[in-house]
Amino acid sequence: MTAALAIFVGFVAVTLGVTYWAAGRSSGAGAFFAADRRITAWQNGMAVAGDYMSAASFLGIAGIIAFQGYDGFMYSVGWLVAYLTVLLIVAEPLRNVGKYTMADVLAYRLSPRPVRAMASLSTLTVSTFYMIAQMVGAGALVALLLKDSGIGYEAAVIGVGLLMIVYVVFGGMLATTWVQIIKALLLMSGTVLLSVLVLAHFGFSLSAFFDAVTRVTYHDPSGAEVTRNFLEPGLRFKPPYGALDLISLGLALIFGTAGLPHILVRFYTVPDARTARISVVWAMAIIGSFYVLTTFLGFGAATIVGRDAIAAHGGTNMSAPLLAQALGGEVFFAFISAVAFATILAVVAGLTISASTSFAHDFYTNCLHRGAERSPGEEVRVARVTACVVGVLSIAIALVVGPNTNVAFLVALAFAVAASANLPVIVLSLFWKRFTTRGAVAGLATGLASSIALIVVSPSVMTIDPPTVTGAARHLIQSAPLFPLENPGIVSIPLGFLGALLGTWLGREPAAEAKYAELLVRANTGLGAEKASPPG
Amino acid sequence: MGRKRKDRRRHSARELMPSVGADPDFVEPHVDDEAVAVDWSRAAALPEFQRLLAAKRAFIVPATCFFILYYFSLPILVGYAPEIMKRRVLGPVNLAYLFALSQFVMAWGLAAWYLGAAARFDAMARAVVAAIRTRRTR
């Protein structure tokens, strides 16, 4: 296991070096929040991929496919197709009109203080919930991967939290970007290697591989041996509500990705809308290749390692590392573990910078102080302090929650809020002249409230566990769920739009309508868009 | 475009720009030295701009409808017609998996197609900016 520790230390050393280099270039708001807008298309594409593919995608998706077959692959499909929404609808207008945050687009013609306050609340909610899920997952995982080195859950959580604070506070957006790029490279090379090894295991015969996938044998909870075709749907999404849940999940992914604040801020780091567009296509190439290869990761773990062995050695999240161990021995296991660690760090750094940017830019400067800094550099100082606070809070919450808590619902919640609160108001403010401040605030509020409320009464939180499930793994509310679906999108997204429409119909806002022509021209031509800082 | 922009700088209305805060780095996003004096309603009414909007709409609206229909037909078919989707069509590989794979091809194909179309929109957008400058919509 010393190999794993050595690779971890190597990765940390490289990223700290990058942070030191970036720190010398991260003075000023444009540099700290948007890397001077000088990130190139392929760099930003890699960084978007690194920002997006969380531990949930790398370890979670391999595990879901290894345990639930085809139904897990449905996540892979949604996670890529979602980028068409980003590409066709959101990325270019956002880059042309905004400066640092998603709220810039809303505040362009609506009354800035209420919409910024609500958008900031929504951003912080999405980022915090997503971050807690990542931190708890990271702690449990690192502890498991490094268990022979004597590193426990607490040490792992604190280590991940401190590193992410250092990246963001000292290196700003530039360091975060490069941590994400390095992570994307590591993740892709690990995934390609693992896939090639899986294929080699089957003599490079796709038909032998898929043949094995059609008859996977394992023991069900009652102890009986079952053989299933893992290419067939139905292992996760079961009647009576499975089909609806699947559609609801699809809605949250397709409309949520284009509303994730930590993804949206990435489009402010490039020089113009054209570069933003090309960077989305780069991201789609990387993200798509990765998710196609989850076929080999997930089904490979199911056929080569087997469900029983994975369950006995740490559970679903260990599928990819155990597959690496089975095919490439200890050193490859160590490498894949280090990739998982890098994956988590890059995502939490992205979440931290988007949360602190939103707090400093939207809430502190524009809401509390009406758009003016009281002293030069105040906005960046506030963002740095926020990053420390967000980091320390996440560490504290992850320590309190503990390693065995079922936190997967927090990721579903983040996508639901992004799809139900953020996306409707972004789209309506860009494309509907009549849209008003009241509409935006009402849309954000209903989307946010309905997503949270529906998740709380969903089976992810509200379930009666059998007595065999003990301790923190038990669901938070022990009663029958009031809402049958795990994914609230199918109800909360229409509610978010409805809130925005009703709020708008309450009364007209001539000032906002008058500015629509300006928004339209600028969003579509890039006239007057924020420019990259000259090199220096 | 860069050179033209410099030429215009002499006429730019920097003096009209409201000063925001003490830090020159901090400017509200919609205040821009070049854009502040444009008559936006007249700019939006320019035939060049209307053509750009129509061209973008003609691509983006059908493309969005198409990918949403194509994508959601997967969970709908998998959810409500699993027996059809379980049918094996290529050795051991069934329709469900092939349809899921085709989503990747669809997404990449549509993205590539959009890149081509967007290059055309970029040229049209440059024409709009030139028209705004020469026709004195300021």
Image (cartoon, rainbow, N blue to C red):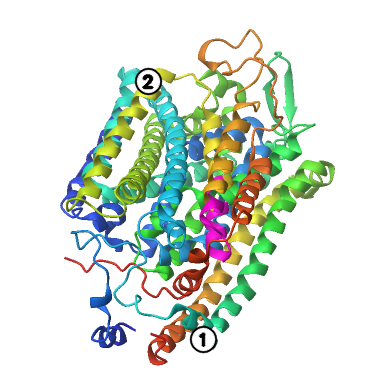
Residue at point 52%, 74% (across, down): B118
**Residue B107 screen position, x and y as percent:** 60, 60
| Foreground tag (2 vs 1) | 1
* Residue beneath disc 1: B46
Tell me where residue A391 sits by quadrant.
top left
Question: Does the magenta-highlighted stretch encompass residue A440?
Answer: no
Question: Does the magenta-highlighted stretch encompass residue A438?
Answer: yes
**Mark 1 belongs to which amino acid?**
Leu
Foreground pick, A149 / A128: A128
Label 1: which secondary element: loop
**Residue B64 screen position, x and y as percent:** 64, 63
* Residue beneath disc 2: A399
**Residue A366 screen position, x and y as percent:** 33, 51
Tell me where residue B50 sits by quadrant.
bottom right
On-image quarter of the C terminus of chain A? bottom left
Foreground pick, A196 / A124: A124
